[in-house]
Image (cartoon, coloured by chain):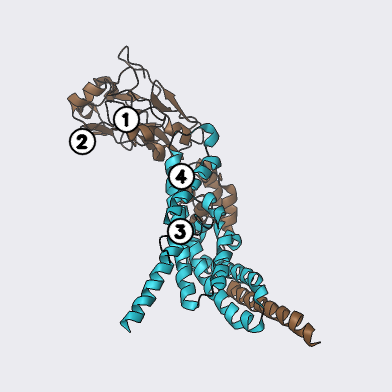
Amino acid sequence: MMNELGTIVGQIIITMLSAILVENLVLSRFLGMCPFLGVTQKTSTAAGMGIAVAAVLMIVAALAWIVNVTLLVPNNLEFLQTMSYILIIAAVVQFLETVLRKFIPPLYKALGIYLPLITTNCAVLGIPLINTQRGYDFGMTLVYTLGAGLGFAMALVLFSGVRERMAKSDIPASLQGVSGALFAATLVSMSFFGFQGLFAK
Amino acid sequence: MNNFFVHFAIPALILGGLGLVLGLILAYSAKAFAVKIDERIKFVRSVLPGANCGACGQAGCEAFAEAAVEGKVKPSGCPVGGEAVAKNVAAILGVELGDTVSTVARVACGGTIAVSRLKYSYDGIKSCAAATALHNGPKTCAFGCLGFGDCVAACPFDAIVIENGVARIVEEKCRSCEACVAACPKKLISMVPRGKNFVVACKSTQKGPATKKACDVGCIACSKCVKVCPHDAITVTNNLARIDPALCQNCGECVKVCPTDAIREIGGVLRVEGKAV
């Protein structure tokens, strides 16, 4: 009994850590590059966006799993996965926007344009598809999604720190702005490749 | 027939049904969680300057308009728009306009290149924030203006110039948005009411001899100004004289007795020769 529990906990921890570090959404899978470059000028907005995406991811992944298992798979309609996931994402983001506006106006204002933009964030579509592809059950779906969301938020916050430092540095004129940011993103991404093989099977 | 049903009708029904259910939820939530928006906010917003500078203490013009409609801030709360905007806002809200005291930014340092000394030669990034990180900057006085112009870059109205290594506010251009106050790493810039012409151009809280060693025009806390001021507007705390703008009557007695020219009249001429303003 204890042994079984230990295996499950171990599996959860490994899935979580590999979602955060080894398979980091932005830095290893290169999903969600738009907010990664767009909202990382300041740490505060980067953290806000990261948490918003993580929250949306959790809700979307759970709903997508339910829709997939109850509606699509029994009817042999797996080819509708992408389309129905997009539908779910759009509805969830829209719903969140209304709810946030009513109950947490400061957060609604802070996120501003980025909240509707989550709809078109490929990371949000990518995670439910990956979950389905790997055949995770409901629990593992939530664990992996939470890890992916945290990894996304962490990547954004880390990179915003780099960019805040770069803003005060003396960098050549041709490398100021987006081009320099892309170089920095490359280096951060390369450093994350050091995690490859961390959990070798 | 059966084939048609399996391949087209069921997928269409499922996807359509999913869309319908989600759509109904959204329609319901839009009604249930609707936020009533006061339409006066839109009107107030339209008469504001729209620079989103945040000088009013709100997150931007939109936030100010909202706060004004809710009565959290006064119509005169927009320092950039000044009296004209305040009147418009008050008219829209139908309230009395309070007194508006226009303010202007002041730099509390007079340590130009000629009168101050350096402790090392700085050849780094031309930014006060960067220089400050290195032993409080190259100036011997740890409190003085470094003159790299972080405030100049922050000013949206081109109201700041660097003259002889020290920032100076062009008062006619200053719209008191306080962007410079936030930008100065030495916290030398503060807002004072317009029309108060006398200022202690020093922020050094070191003891007199140390201040004197670093800069010719620093405040050495001799307290002569405190004694001579007929309106009790000057106090000395932490080895530094301060003029209370609420009490100052612009009589100028303090300037006459200040031995180091730390107190000066804005736009006036220095008495001591060889000390450039």
**Mark 2 belongs to which amino acid?**
Asn
Looking at this view, is B219 or A7 the one in front?
A7
Q: Chain of mark 1?
A: B
Tag 2 secondary structure: loop
Give the distance between the C-alpha atoms of the residues marked 2 and 1, in whole angstroms.
22 Å
| x, y percent for residue B120 | 29, 24
Q: Nearer the viewer, mark 3 or mark 2?
A: 3
Local crowd size for mark 3, using a 10 Å CA cut-off: few (<14), some (14–19), many (≥20): many
Q: Nearer the viewer, mark 2 or mark 1?
A: 1
Look at mark 3 in the image and give the residue it sits on.
Answer: A153
Look at mark 1 in the image and give the residue it sits on.
Answer: B137
Q: Chain of mark 2?
A: B
Q: Where, by quadrant of the figure, is residue A146 drawn?
A: bottom left
Tag 4 secondary structure: helix
Do marks 2 and 4 share a chain? Answer: no
Do marks 3 and 4 share a chain? Answer: yes
Tag 1 secondary structure: loop
Give the distance between the C-alpha atoms of the residues marked 3 and 1, in whole angstroms.
36 Å
Looking at this view, is B172 or A59 the one in front?
A59
Residue B239's disc is none
Local crowd size for mark 2, using a 10 Å CA cut-off: few (<14), some (14–19), many (≥20): few
| x, y percent for residue B176 | 45, 38
Look at mark 2 in the image and give the residue it sits on.
Answer: B238
Which quarter of the rendered picture does the C terminus of chain A lie within? bottom left
List the single residue furthest toward the front: A201
Colour that chain A carries in the picture: cyan
Q: Nearer the viewer, mark 2 or mark 4?
A: 4
Look at mark 4 in the image and give the residue it sits on.
Answer: A163
Give the distance between the C-alpha atoms of the residues marked 3 and 4, in whole angstroms.
15 Å
